Each structure stands twice: as C-alpha cells, then as structure tokens.
Image (cartoon, rainbow, N blue to C red):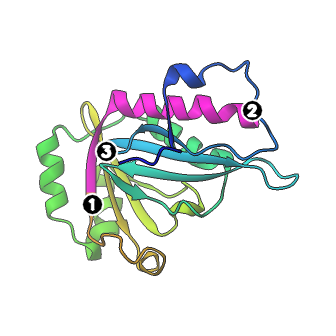
Amino acid sequence: MENTWWKTLTLERVSDKSKKPNMKKNSDIYIFGNKDNFAVQSQILFLGNTQPLEKVQIWFKGISVGWFEDINLLSITNNQLNFLKNRLEENYIPNDDKFYNFIKQLSKKNLTKTLSDDNTNFFKISNLGEAFDDFGIFNTLLKNSIGFVWYLGKYGKIRLPGYRHKIQYHIIEKSFFIDVVDSYTLAIEKYWK
C-alpha cells in the first residue's frame, strides 16, 4: 500500500508551465509512472543559493533502483532518460524470447563484459547520477519495448543490505517509457528554465 504523502502525477497535471514552483521550499515526493512497471520518483531540493537539486530513484516492476537519499544535480537523471528515449529507433533485438534467453545465460561475473560487447545491442547506463553509483544498469531495445538489466554492485551491499543481489531485468513498452519520461521532464524543467 502506497503512503498517502506520495503523489502520482499525470501528463496533464504537470504540463501547465504558467504555474511557477516555490523556489524556496522543497517539493513533495512525486512518482511519474507506475512503480509496478516503470516509474521515476523525484523530490526537488533547494539548499541555500545553489541550483535546484534532486533526490531521484527509478522503479522497475516494484523494485527500486538507486539510493533515494543521495542528492543529484537536477537535470542529470532526466537528461540520461531523454537520451535513451531519443535512441528508441536504433538497432534492436528482434524479439523478447531472444532477450529472455540471453538474460538466463548471464552471471554477475560476465555481465559487464558480455553486455558491453558491441554484438549484444546493450547499452550501459552510466550517467544517471550519484544515486545510481551502486548499480550496474544496462538497457537494450526490443521491437516495441525496452529491456533493462540491473544489479547491485559490491559496495551497494553495505548501503542496501536487504536488496536482492541477483541480476534483475524488466521489459517496458516503449510508449509507456516515453510517457513517463515526458511527464517527468515537463514537471522538472520549470525548475531550471
């Protein structure tokens, strides 16, 4: 059951750019998307006279990725997600079965080397911000969806002792991924424009 102080935003609610945010007060915690599929959890922070900062976390199939207590520059995670969104028409794995079969053959020992091989069509996501430093996150394009593969690195086990340490994966429909990233972008860009 969700906590009542979390707010789920829709594209319509955040698209009104005429409303200026309160630049002196930290924002509520917002969820863009659906945690059980794909979501971005964000809170905008104002610390002194600095640029707005952000606490951010990504959710895949109800599992959080990232350390929500770390503070990032506001645009870093958003820029990387938009980069992924803009490359959705590049080479892709022809079907989901090939993706699942490929994932079953992976182990943590060969994961980074195997997924970084140019022949796999996987892309290492390395610039999401400090909140994601403890994770290895990769994605690949499927015909109508995006496959994500992630794992918690060895240093992350200290900060997140109860986190599942196996290789994990999830497939998201492209249209849903685009909607979530667009909603997230519309909501936070008013803080840096």
Labelled disc at residue 168: 1
Which image quarter: residue 142?
top left
- First reached walking from the N terminus: tag 1 or tag 2: 2
Type of amino acid at the residue the image marks with label 1: Gln
Label 1 vs label 2, nearer the camera: 2
Calculate the distance from the C-alpha at mark 3 to the C-alpha at mark 1. 14 Å
Q: Which mark is residue 36?
A: 3
**Pointer 3 or 1: first along the chain:** 3
User: In the rendered image of this protein, does residue 168 appear above or below residue 175?
Assistant: below
Residue hosting label 2: 21
Tell me, yes or no, whether the two marked residues, 2 and 3, touch with CB atoms within 8 Å: no
Using residue 185 as the reference point, say whether residue 85 is left or right of it.
left
Element carrying mark 3: loop
Q: Residue at x 62, y 43 (%)?
A: 28
Please state the horizontal and vertical placement of residue 176, each as a whole percent of the image.
Answer: 36, 30
Q: Which sits earlier in the primary sequence, circle 2 or circle 3?
A: 2
